[in-house]
Image (cartoon, rainbow, N blue to C red):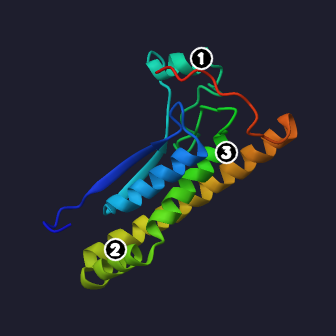
Amino acid sequence: HKLGLVVHGDFILGLPGETRDTIKNTIAFAKELDVETIQVSVAHAYPGTELYDYAQRNNVLASEALVDMQGHQLPHLDYPWLGREEMMAAVNRFYDSYYFRPHVIWRIVRKAVWNAHERKRLYHEAVEFLRLRTERWKYARKASSRTRAVAGPITDSRSRPESGN
């Protein structure tokens, strides 16, 4: 920040071994870094990778689809202890808890007030952020209702597959 450089952080949720606690720790780490912008993604197991082999071996590859018809990323790894809908909800929680902090909001507002180009860019980013946020919540709710209807409630008593490490 001191040199005027924009520092961006990328974070991936849903890699093998991910739990609710590791997600909380990753969010806390991101807040500690306090970078200018973040991107939060769900892990994707591409064919031919170790992650894909792990997912097939442990029967956690729920779908081959990586994106929906609109190009939104879809979680396709579904762990018994951390389902796809929970991962998408965690992406939203990550963004919300990162960007909706008073000093971050102030940093954004301050930029928008003093720079017309930045104001326009931030406006378009905010609109897109809220649109994608809504889409992720819709996906999480729809997937959650499907999971409950088919399998019943998810409990923490299910065992975890081998870690692959």
Q: Secondary structure at mark 1?
A: helix
| Total residue callouts | 3
- Which residue type does callout 2 highlight? Lys
Foreground of the two, 16 or 39: 16
The residues bearing labels 3 and 2 have C-alpha atoms spaced at a distance of: 33 Å
> Mark 1, mark 2: which one is toward the viewer?
1
Say if 139 sits above or below 132 in the image: above
Q: Which numbered disc covers residue 85?
A: 3
Expressed as whole percent of the image width and height from the top left, the position of residue 39 reads: 41, 52
Instruction: Say whether marks 1 and 2 touch (CB < 8 Å).
Output: no
Q: Is residue 37 left or right of residue 134?
A: left
> At which x and y percent is residue 94?
51, 57
| Marks 3,2: beta carbons within 8 A | no
**Upstream in sequence: badge 1 or badge 2:** 1
Q: Residues within 10 Å of mark 2 (few under 14, many from 20)?
A: few
Disc on res. 120: 2
Front one among 150 and 33:
33
Q: What amino acid is found at the position of numbered circle 1 in the picture?
A: Gln
Q: How far across and how far down the image is residue 135, in percent? A: 61, 54
The residue indicated by pointer 1 is: 56
